[in-house]
Image (cartoon, rainbow, N blue to C red):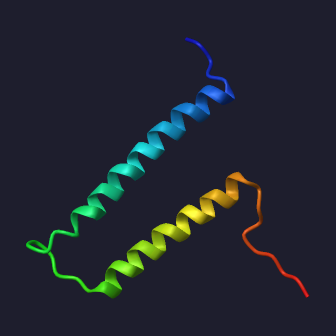
Amino acid sequence: MKIENKREKFIRLAENRTNKVLKEIDLIGNLANRSNYEYTLEDTEKIIRALKKSVTDLENKFSNKSRREFKL
């Protein structure tokens, strides 16, 4: 059995986790069907805002930017 190196492990986990998230986002998109669900514009804005914030946090982690910064 071959031992997985760090790059191989990253690729395996990144593909699996990204595919899971994309599937879940598709499922959230299914909620847009007004014949099955009732929602407000505020509801959808909250969902989209939460997803965008999560993506921004992810981008910051990969770019090594700190999430919080204080300046005087």
Q: Going by the image, does 19 lie left or right of 33? A: right
Measuring 22% from the left and 83% from the top, which residue is drawn there? 39
Image position, residue 34 (x, y; %) = 14, 74
The answer to which image quadrant residue 70 occupies is bottom right
User: Which residue sits furthest front?
Assistant: 41
Q: Where is residue 71, by image quadrant?
A: bottom right
Given residues 12 and 45, the one toward you in this image is 45
Q: Residue at x 60, y 26 (%)?
A: 8
Q: x and y percent of residue 25 in the render?
A: 35, 58
From the viewer's side, name the closer residue of 58 and 33: 33
Q: Which image quarter holds the N terminus?
A: top right
Residue 62 screen position, x and y as percent = 69, 52
Residue found at the far top of this picture: 1
Residue beneath the point at 60% across and 65% down: 56
On the image, the x and y values in percent for residue 51 come to 46, 67
Q: Is residue 19 above or below residue 59?
A: above
Q: Which residue is rendered at x = 47% and y = 45% of the image?
A: 17
